[in-house]
Amino acid sequence: MENENVVFEGDNNSQPEVKTPKFLTRKTKRLIFYTSIISIFIIETLIWYVYVNASTFVLAFQEYEATISGNIPHFVGFKNFETIITLFKDPGNFDMIQTSLLMYAFHLCVGTVLALFLSYYVYKKMLLGGFFRVILFLPSIMSSVVMVTLYKYMVNDCYMEAFNQTTGLLKGDHMTSVIMVIVYNLWMGYGTDVLMYTGAMGGINPSVVEASELDGCNALQEFIYVTIPCIFPTFITFIVAGLSHIFTNQMALYTFYAGTSDVRSVGYFMYCQNKSSPGLVKREFYDFLTYPELSALSMMITLITCPIVLTIRFLLNKYGPNTR
C-alpha cells in the first residue's frame, strides 16, 4: 500500500507563510512623527520671529520713495528714530506715555494686590470662593465687544440716569475717562490672574501649610510668610509680562471709542496706524506714521523695556523670598 502524504491543517510540515517585508520600523515611524511636529514649530519660529524681527530691524533704517515702478527703499540712517523722538517730545503726544505708565502702575499696585487676596480667598475654600472664581473668570471668555458695551452702559447711561448728569464718565474730562478705562482693564484682568494664582497656590505642599498652622500662624501670616514665597515664581512671571507690555497695551481703547478717543496710550496709537494707505509715502503730520517709522518706534520700545525687564527679573530672583 502506497504511503500517501497527507498534510493536515496546522501541521509543522506545511509550507511557511510568505512575510511581507516592513519598510518602516516602529522607531522610524516615531522619528518621522517627531520630525513632522518639530518642523512646524521651527518653521513658525523662522517666519514669525526671525524673519519678522529681522525685517523690522532693516526697515527701521530705510525710507520708501514712491515711483511709477513701485516703492523703492533707501537707507536713511537714524532719520526715522529722530522722527519718533520729535513726535514724543511734543507735549500734545506725551500723554500717551503717561497713560501707558499709569495703566501699569494701577495694575501693579491695585490689580495685582487684589488678585492675590482674591486668589487666596478662593484657595482657602472660604464662603462662595468657587462662585467668585467663576464670576471673575467669566468676562475673560466672553466677547470683548459685549463686555465693553455692558461697561459703557453702566458708566455712561446708568450714571447719567442715576445722578441726573448730561455726560457719562467715559465722556467727561480726560482724567475721569482714563480712570474708567483703567478700571475696566483691571476688571477684565482678574480672571486670568486669579486662575493662575490659585493654580500655583494649589501646588503648595500641604505639609508646609500644616506646619505653619501648628506654629500658630493665622490666615494673614500664612498668606505673607508661606503662600507668597511659594508662588513667587508665578508672581515674577506676571510682573515681567506686565513690564514687557507697558507700551504695547492698547487698553481696549479702540473698542471703546472706535479710533476717535481723546484718551491715548502708546499701544493704542500704534494700533490705530491701520489706514488703507500703504504707509510708505511721506506725510506732513504725525497722525499717521509710515511703516519704517513704526519699525523704528517698535525698536525704541524694545530697547527701553528690555533692560528694565531683565533688571527687574534679576532683582526679584535675587532678593525675593526663597523657599529653599
Image: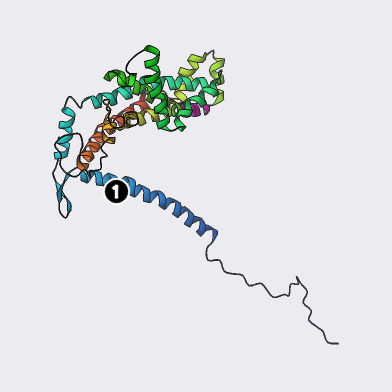
* Residue 315 showing in the rendered view: yes
Q: Position of residue 278 (x, y in %)?
A: 23, 45
Q: Residue at x 25, y 34 (%)?
A: 301
In the drawing, does residue 150 fall left or right of residue 69? right
Overall secondary structure of the magenta stretch?
Answer: helix
Q: What stretch of residues is rendered in magenta?
A: 197-202
**Between 275 and 30, which is closer to the camera in this rendering?**
275
Name above or below for residue 11 compared with residue 135.
below
Q: Which quadrant of the figure has residue 305?
A: top left
**Between 13 and 132, which is closer to the camera in this rendering?**
132
**Between 49 and 2, which is closer to the camera in this rendering?**
49
In the drawing, does residue 7 fall left or right of residue 180? right
Q: Is mark 1 on a helix, strand or loop?
A: helix
Q: Which quadrant of the figure has residue 232?
A: top left
Q: Which quadrant of the figure has residue 319?
A: top left
To which residue does mark 1 refer? 51
Q: How many labels does the image show?
A: 1
Name above or below for residue 60 compared with residue 117.
below
Q: Residue at x 32, y 27 (%)?
A: 312
Q: Residues within 10 Å of mark 1 (few under 14, many from 20)?
A: few
Q: Where is residue 74 in the image (x, y as percent from the top left)?
A: 14, 48
What's the amino acid at mark 1? Tyr
Q: Which residue is drawn at 45% across and 22% down?
A: 116
Residue at the extreme right: 1
Q: Where is residue 276 in the image (x, y as percent from the top left)?
A: 25, 43
In the drawing, does residue 16 fall left or right of residue 287? right
**Between 220 and 211, which is closer to the camera in this rendering?**
220
Q: Position of residue 172 (x, y in %)?
A: 29, 18
